[in-house]
Image (tube, helix red, strand yellow):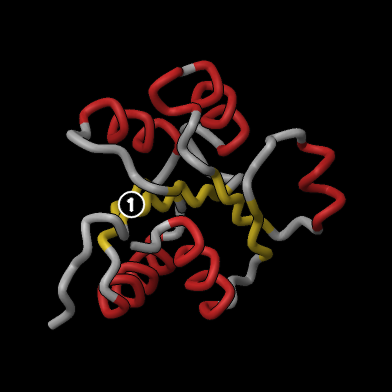
């Protein structure tokens, strides 16, 4: 059973239930504490009610209810959440991500490569 390090804490916003379950198993096995939201609206509700904020947010762009674009606009306007590093998860290429103007710290191309995902996670959740 892994020992969870409170500094290893991420929020993953992803609408695919299958992918959330896979990532939940992967991260827990690696010793990370991860919370999940199925869309931007759930993610904002989680952030507003959470006792402590995650070290990083992984954000899918295309989701029902509230997409990643809308979530990011709201996140940037909220002083409490604006400083949380954002990693975009998308099928778009680097130039397309830059055109989106998100000022994201990083992006991960879908389909996700688990080694890349864990490397990026380690960058923001080391400790």
- Count of marks, rendered view: 1
At a point 33% along the width and 52% down the height, the residue shown is 36
Residue 118 drawn at (x, y percent): 48, 72
Which residue position holds label 1? 36
Above or below — where is 32 with respect to 115?
A: above
Quarter of the image with the N terminus is bottom left
> Observer-nearest residue: 42 or 26?
26
Which type of secondary structure does the marked residue at label 1 adopt? strand
Quarter of the image with the C terminus is bottom left
At a point 35% along the width and 77% down the height, the residue shown is 26
Above or below — where is 113 with respect to 19?
A: below
Residue 110 drawn at (x, y percent): 65, 66
> Observer-nearest residue: 64 or 114?
114
27 sits to left or right of 81: left
**Residue reaching furthest front?**
127
92 sits to left or right of 36: right
At a point 28% along the width and 35% down the height, the residue shown is 46
Q: Quadrant of residue 34?
A: bottom left
How many residues crowd mark 1 within 10 Å: few (<14), some (14–19), many (20+)?
A: many
Residue 75 drawn at (x, y percent): 50, 26
Q: Quadrant of residue 54?
A: top left
At a point 46% along the width and 18% down the height, the residue shown is 78
56 sits to left or right of 96: left
Q: Quadrant of residue 93?
A: bottom right
């Amino acid at each position: 059973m892994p020992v969870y390090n409170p500094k290893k804490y991420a929020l993953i916003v992803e609408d695919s239930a299958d992918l959330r379950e896979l990532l939940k198993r992967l991260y827990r096995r690696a010793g990370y504490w991860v919370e999940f939201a199925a869309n931007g609206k759930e993610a904002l509700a989680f952030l507003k009610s959470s006792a402590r904020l995650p070290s990083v947010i992984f954000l899918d762009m295309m989701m029902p209810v509230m997409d990643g674009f809308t979530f990011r606009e709201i996140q940037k306007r909220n002083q409490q959440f604006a400083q949380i590093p954002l990693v975009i998860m998308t099928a778009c290429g680097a130039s397309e991500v830059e055109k989106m103007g998100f000022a994201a710290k990083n992006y991960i191309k879908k389909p996700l490569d688990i080694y890349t995902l864990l490397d990026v996670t380690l960058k923001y959740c080391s400790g």
